[in-house]
Image: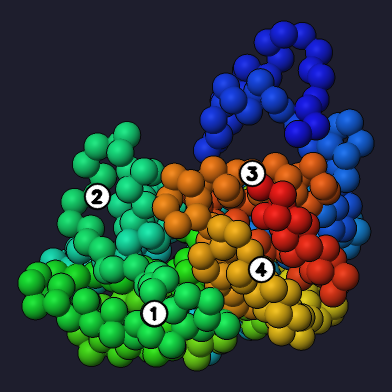
Amino acid sequence: MDTLTTPGSNSLDAYWMPFTANRDFKANAALISHAEGLYYFTSNGHRLLDAIAGLWCVNAGHGHPRIVEAIQKQAARLDFASSFGLGHPLVFEYANRLTSIAPADMNHVFFTNSGSEAADTAIKIALAYHHARGEGQRQRIVGRQRGYHGVGFGGLSAAGMGPHKKQFGMLLPGAVHLPHTHDPVRNAFSLGQPRHGAELADALEQMIATYDASTIAAVIVEPVAGSTGVLVPPVGYLERLRELCTRHGILLIFDEVVTGFGRLGRPFAADRFGVIPDLLMVAKGMTNGAVPMGGVIASSAIYDAVTGKAGSGAVELSHGYTYSGHPLAAAAGLASLDVYVSEGLFERAARLEPHWQTCAHTLKGLPGVVDIRNLGLLAGIELGEDPVRGKALARNVYEHCFDHGVLVRPVANTIVLSPPLTIGEDEIETIFATIKAALKSD
Ligand code: PMP
């Protein structure tokens, strides 16, 4: 790895980095100094093709001039205005624009500052909805194994990643988990959506039999699980979940923090799969990663039930963040959406998907490759017959790619990829050729 010489022996220690092996990283740190378009540049001048769009967020590429300008202008015009009983026009405009690209009937946005806050907010809205309808006993949240919904206590409880929970005690009571849909035996090397596994959704029926539907508030899933290795839902699976939720009065929450804003070639995964949730979580690509922001888009039925009738003056949802609907985030969000739409980036992702898929699957048969999963401009390359060897292999691939100018992301034994939607065919080929060389050199 190309390392950074840092001034002063302790200069890296003050920053306690998130989700990082701090001491290992700091012994061998390579820091990013700037970025442009598809590329990062390190402080010592190394150029990296960003094959992960920052962290699944920079969909229009880094430093897009229209987004930069919008943030700069907004900072000079209005730096902050509370959303607690106050407001500024831009955030209302942005909410309208967002709901105009959201699935039909999803007409209301509650703004947060991150995906984790969106998860906690969606869970709280689901609970408040049932409470408002006199069904306050519906409190159980159903998540899924290998789900990731950020790090707040709600999202963490619903998530199904054991290692993230170990340090934090009891979490939310009553969270239960559907099985994940990863089936490397029946579905290995599927092109796009795997064929087998729709019946895994029926585990919800067993839960209903065990706990009774009248105790279950919501089911929360990522349409495509990202952080746990790009797990694409089997054909028919999400449809089945939707059908069961509707039949039993359970809300369906889609965590579209990764899949939103064109990642699957449509505005949202809900559009791609033709399955409409009751609550839809967004973050990341919302502002092209430029300013922290998240949100929950709610159906009219939920908004109407929770907000009730005008006239009482009572606060109906006791929830919100100081920075909900922050002016800079709203400006970045509006500009990002303008760029996505005017540059046709969702359609571009759809157009590039076949080439992306073909290139990804050229890795089949290489040493260590046990599965390749893809949809839209997402891919997961699973490595190693056993998880320990696979994890080491993924780390080696990451380092090789880094040294050869491509930034990929190892998560456990899988290399995950989610490039900016502005990527071209040549750069797609570069990404997979570099991974191929890494696998051959191991
Ligand atoms: N949900 C999903 C599906 C995510 O991938 C992430 C972040 N990777 C989150 C929620 C949490 O978002 P944040 O890190 O902005 O809190």
Mark before the other along the chain sequence, 3 or 1: 1
Residue ID for mark 1: 186
Q: Is residue 428 in view?
A: yes
Figure quadrant of residue 52: bottom right
Q: Is residue 330 left or right of residue 387?
A: right
Say what amino acid the circle numbered 1 marks. Answer: Arg
Say what amino acid the circle numbered 2 marks. Answer: Leu
Q: Nearer the viewer, mark 3 or mark 2?
A: 3
Residue 366 percent coordinates (x, y): 63, 64
Residue ID for mark 2: 172
Mark before the other along the chain sequence, 2 or 4: 2
Q: CA distance from mark 3 to mark 1?
A: 28 Å
Q: CA distance from mark 2 to mark 4?
A: 41 Å
Residue ID for mark 3: 396
- How crowded pointer 2 is (Cα within 10 Å; few <14, some 14-19, many 20+) is rated as some
Task: Please give the label number shown on residue 363.
Answer: 4
- On screen, residue 27 above or below 322: above
Say what amino acid the circle numbered 4 marks. Answer: Leu
Q: Which element is circle 1 on?
A: loop
Kindly indicate whether the residue at mark 1 contacts the one at mark 4 (C-beta within 8 angstroms): no
Q: Which element is circle 3 on?
A: helix
